[in-house]
Image (cartoon, grey):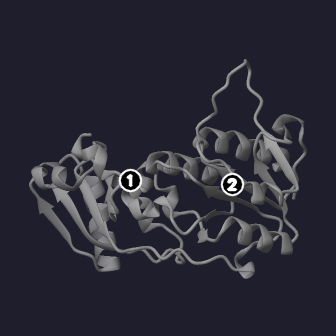
Amino acid sequence: MPQKETDKFVPSNVFEGMTSISSLLSSPQENERRIEEIWISEEKRSSKAREIAFLKAKAKECGFPIVFVPKERIEEYAVGNSHGGILAFCSDRRIPRLKASDIVENGFYVYLEGIEDPYNFGYTIRSLYMAGVDGVLLPERNWMSAAGVVARASAGTSEQIPLYTASPEDAVSVFRSKGYRIVCAGIRDSVSLFDSSFSYPILLVIGGEKRGISRAVLDLADDIVRIDYGRSFRGSLSSSAAAAVMAFEIMRQNRHKE
């Protein structure tokens, strides 16, 4: 496996490119991650003049240094190719354990479990953010350790959306205590997503392609829904595609409701 491909699975707080860095700079105050240093390729001084001016202003405001380095140094630390010659070295982000007081009234949350690739994880978060999800619940072991890769795949939305950790069972218990409907993605004993009616507040539980959702959690669900295909197919959608379809259908059904 090429080294760069291997690097995507390594814990890293190196953010690549202006999209990820700008999202972090505008992230909610509750996101404790901070930029410690920014590297800019020396050859980008002219072509990235506008971005550099923006970063210098933010550096003065936030107190982090900007260092111009040879492009080879950028390539040494970058995993992808879309960094545009700009990297940010960042602190860790603490993801709090879910409490009932964190949950908004009449909201829409998603629990993600078992996604086995940081890019797929990032794509999933991007879809959920764009569908208006109020927060994402994660198990203790998740891909936020590979924060730079996830931020790039999510177009920076992983730093914008509220994140919490909880076991699936605890999440279901807390959300049910707040009057939320629990909807799980699954096949057994399911009904079609497109024949179902959804009203907020909702907790949607989505599992990975391989392991899915545990039977114990499925047994706690108010509804188990599936995505019907347009033709016979024995495989499954990727978690990111399934999350997008389900989240946007739920959003569609609630878009005109107050």
Dot placed on the residue nearer the N-terminal end, 2 or 1: 2
Q: Does 20 sit left or right of 226 as displayed? A: left
Q: Residue at x 26, y 58 (%)?
A: 87
Question: Which quadrant, please, contains the C terminus?
Answer: bottom right
Q: Residues within 10 Å of mark 2 (few under 14, many from 20)?
A: some
Question: What kind of residue is marked 2?
Answer: Gly
Say which quadrant the N terminus sits in.
top left
User: Quick one: SS at disc 2?
Assistant: loop
The residue lying toward the viewer, choosing from 15 and 255, is 15
Q: Residue at x 70, y 39 (%)?
A: 245
Percent across and percent down for residue 36 are: 28, 74
Expressed as whole percent of the image width and height from the top left, the position of residue 70 reads: 9, 54
Q: Which residue is mark 2?
A: 132
Give the residue type at disc 1: Val
Q: Quadrant of residue 59?
A: bottom left
Q: In percent of the image, x 58 and y 63: which residue is there?
A: 161
Give the residue at mark 1: 149
